Image (cartoon, rainbow, N blue to C red):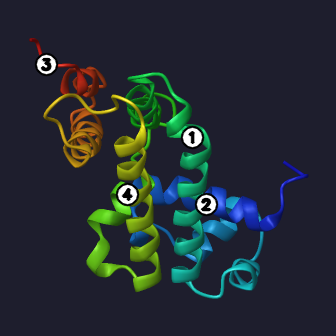
Amino acid sequence: MPDQSARDQILDAAEKRARMAGYHGFSFRDLAEDVGIKSSSVHYHFPTKGELAEALARRYTLRVAEKLGDPDDLAPGAGRARVVSLFRDALLIDDRMCLCGLFGAERDALPPPVAAAVADFFGLILDYLERAPAAVRRGEKPAALLARLEGALILARALNDPGLFDEATAAPDS
């Protein structure tokens, strides 16, 4: 995309690699090759990998917030459907893990600003589920739903069986 800035191209390449292999799964040299620039150009935009990963997590969170929209304007249950679709799309459309899910698993190895950006992502989702009407079912906690979604994504990818995502996230029989 000629109209896309080098910074955005770097972030796109980093997101693709990070959603497959985590924080330590890519280098500036990899990103430079992906974008078709010198690694010094990657360093120009992001002096450290931590700064790159923080920008990546913050951009990812912003995009998720935009996709979800305002939870106060939703019909009952629509917020849940939107959150579930984020994770389902990650699996079926992107064929990737949730960026912040992967980074969250690596929390102890992340620079503190990256860990904070990842925590902000999870805070956003939890707040959204709290505020959206009927996003969680009676007796269900937002954290339990979020954990089920992240776990279902891992399970479906690990076993290469997307149907497991739907099975793990389906409403229990009443």
Direction from residue 111 to residue 56 in the image, left or right: right
Above or below for 124 versus 85: below
Q: Which residue is mark 4?
A: 122
Q: CA distance from mark 2 to mark 1?
A: 18 Å
Residue 34 versus residue 9: which sits nearer the camera?
Answer: 9
Q: Quadrant of residue 35?
A: bottom right
Q: CA distance from mark 3 to mark 1?
A: 27 Å
Q: Which residue is mark 1?
A: 70
Direction from residue 7 to residue 4 in the image, left or right: right
Q: What amino acid is found at the position of numbered circle 1 in the picture?
A: Asp
**Image x and y of residue 173, in percent:** 11, 12
Q: What amino acid is found at the position of numbered circle 3 in the picture?
A: Pro
The answer to which of marks 2 and 3 sits earlier in the sequence is: 2
Determine whether label 2 and label 4 are within 8 Å by CB: no
The answer to which of marks 1 and 4 sits earlier in the sequence is: 1
Q: CA distance from mark 2 to mark 3?
A: 34 Å
Determine whether label 1 and label 4 are within 8 Å by CB: no
Q: CA distance from mark 2 to mark 4?
A: 14 Å
Q: What amino acid is found at the position of numbered circle 4 in the picture?
A: Phe
Q: Which mark is residue 172?
A: 3
The answer to which of marks 4 and 3 sits earlier in the sequence is: 4
**Image x and y of residue 99, in percent:** 44, 55
Residue drawn where x is 40% and y is 37% of the image: 87
Q: What amino acid is found at the position of numbered circle 2 in the picture?
A: Arg
Residue drawn where x is 55% and y is 56% of the image: 60
SS category of the residue bearing label 1: loop
Above or below for 166 versus 174: below
Q: Which mark is residue 59?
A: 2
The answer to which of marks 2 and 4 sits earlier in the sequence is: 2
Q: Which mark is residue 142?
A: none
